[in-house]
Image: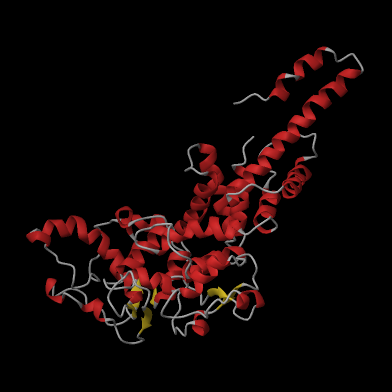
Amino acid sequence: MRTRLSDRIKSPCRNFARRALAVSCCALLTAPLAMADIREQAKRIHDRLTGVAPSQALLDAMVADITASNGGANASAGAGHGVAAALRAIDNGDGDEFYSVTLKNMATPWTNRDQTVFAPLNDYTATYIGMVRDELDLREMLYADIIYTANTGNAAVQAANIPAYSNSNNRHYEQFENSGLSFSDPNVLARGTQSSVTGLAAPAGVMTTRGAAKSFFVLGTNRAMFRFTLMSQLCVDLEQVHDITLVPDRIRQDVTRSPGGDSTAFLNGCVGCHNGMDPLTQAFAYYNYNDPDGNPDTDDGSLEYTPGVVQPKYLINEANFTPGYITENDNWANYWREGQNRSLGWDPALSGSGTGAASMGMELAHSEAFAQCQVKKVFNTVCLRDADSTADVNKIDSMVTGFKANGYNLKQVFAETADYCMGE
């Protein structure tokens, strides 16, 4: 552990303990250095949360936050005292960077198949940002009737000529992002409902935003929506939940049982993903993304919902295995409540089956894996590394417990993580 200069100078002072000037000597030498350490901690908190340096006024206020809970300026600097300073950096700082940069860059890779950060703001990312800002129960991002849009009734939004939300293009969000308007102001980036803004009859949080649909409901079989949600919100991919011991009775007809003429490839490989995934992805049976020109690079499509009518993509390639499962509705079941994937921590208060995307999203969001995933992503974002010590693992476990006890408020997790990683 690094020895501070303030520690090294204490021994000479103690050698003159009988002299009246000794106490003042130590106080003069240690107090300014401790304050300097605290200022560096405060600056590091701000840098990690926003990516920019704080103003001197803000830095002074953050130092006061730390020292107020740290026993005063003469106390030694240390972890555990920076939460108030972190919250100040997030919501009372000089700019909007925590929301418009840190959260936006964190969430953007979840919204596209390439998992790139270089994509414009859309309704998925804006909704995630708004939910964190407003300290909502983050589990609802996978099942609530919720969406965040620019408030076109706001004078600043009107002055920026932000177009109204559209079901067939993303110009509303692209222009909002380019306008420099505040993400942190609830009167500018405002909460609404998908059912009223988009007219969707069966919303399921970010999974039914246009941004998600454009990437994961287009073409294919709708399995992509499930897989990428699993990756981004539970931090596991299909290889990690592979389990060949489950009943394969809900695997669709399009999955051949003898890939390349080898049935063992199915029995030892394909079945391990599809036996759990297919019963869950049935929840998306009525959704599709219509792309008029068939070009994913153009921005001209919209989400389609056909209640009571299974999308044709669920019935394709039936000749691959005609005895396979035929999707007749959007009833889903979680086979992963049995076998090795019980370790994902499913909520015993839920039944493990249901109808439609929202109830399936609740099944995912109420798992222990969801809570663990959110905290780990924050840790990686703020600390700029994975957990690499027992102390890190214990801290993450503690924050997961607090995250759940505090109504799944992720902003608090950001503040606690910044405090933990602000250094000595």
| Residue 154: image location, x then y, percent | 65, 78
Q: Is residue 298 left or right of residue 73?
A: left
| Residue 377: image location, x then y, percent | 49, 52
- The foreground one among 185 and 199 is 185
Question: Is residue 170 at least partly visible in the picture?
Answer: yes
Q: Is residue 411 left or right of residue 242?
A: right
The way the protein has been coloured in the rendering is secondary structure
Q: Quadrant of residue 176?
A: bottom right
| Residue 247: image location, x then y, percent | 24, 65
Residue at the extreme left of the image, as rendered: 261
Q: Considering the image in quadrants, where does the C terminus appear?
A: top right
Number of numbered markers:
0
Q: Residue at x 65, y 24 (%)?
A: 3
Q: Residue at x 62, y 49 (%)?
A: 416
Q: Residue at x 49, y 57 (%)?
A: 105
Q: Quadrant of residue 261?
A: bottom left
Q: Considering the image in quadrants, where does the N terminus appear?
A: top right
Is residue 278 placed above or below 27 in the rendered structure? below
Question: Is residue 334 at least partly visible in the picture?
Answer: no
- The foreground one among 337 and 276 is 276
Is residue 266 placed above or below 190 in the rendered structure? above
- The foreground one among 354 and 321 is 321
Q: Residue at x 63, y 64 (%)?
A: 184
Is residue 306 placed above or below 213 in the rendered structure? below
